[in-house]
Amino acid sequence: MDLIGLIAQFGGWSWIVAGAVLLAIELVVPGGVFVWLGASAIVVGLASLVQAIPWQWQWALFAVLSIAGVAGWIGYVRRRPEATDSPFLNLRTRRFVGRTYTLDEPIENGEGRLRIADTTWRVSGADAAAGRRVTVVGAEGSVLQVEPAGGGTTSV
């Protein structure tokens, strides 16, 4: 039996069953896409139970609702911030930006070293003597970019 014949025979119930199957697929393959496809199918099924709708319009309504739902979901996911208890987990150097530290080794020829907690970091910036206070202003890879401390921010 072809799909159009099945839809014609069972009407809106075929859409509702298809929607339930799509929602079940979402449980196995999470991601948010099948939810909108399943919801769209259920809406089309309910609409066709209430009002006789030609199968062409049922498919058109399903397509419009599915595209709108998936596009809205993708837009929402891209705009919302990631809630995490470790925002700098893979961006370790960003947590140091704006903080002031004391140089352990001098910066010579634009390169030096700085100890933060139990880790020694390479730094780049203007030449400065060991013991000088510097503020981290950025990072390039794992190299912290520093400037002489001006007004003092958080110091460690």
Image (tube, rainbow, N blue to C red):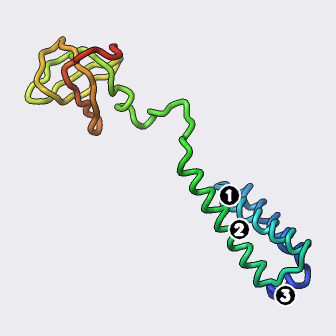
Q: Do the residues labelled 1 and 2 touch (CB within 8 Å)?
A: no
**What residue is shown at x 87% (from left), y 68% (from top)?**
46
Label number found at residue 5: 3
Tell which of 137 and 109 is nearer to you. 137
Q: In which quarter of the image is residue 93?
A: top left
* Residue mark closest to the camera, 2 vs 3: 2
What residue is shown with label 2?
Answer: 65
- Earlier in the chain: of badge 1 and badge 2, it is 1
Q: How far apart are marks 1 and 3 (CA)?
A: 29 Å
Identified by mark 1, the residue type is Val
Q: How far apart are marks 2 and 3 (CA)?
A: 22 Å
- Earlier in the chain: of badge 2 and badge 3, it is 3
Q: Is mark 2 on a helix, strand or loop?
A: helix
Label number found at residue 144: none
**What residue is shown at x 74% (from left), y 55% (from top)?**
27
What residue is shown with label 1?
Answer: 29
* Residue mark closest to the camera, 1 vs 2: 2
Label 2 Cα neighbours within 10 Å, binned few <14 / some 14-19 / many ≥20: some
Tell which of 72 and 32 is nearer to you. 72
Q: How far apart are marks 1 and 2 (CA)?
A: 21 Å
Q: Quadrant of residue 50?
A: bottom right
Q: In which quarter of the image is residue 95?
A: top left
- Earlier in the chain: of badge 1 and badge 3, it is 3
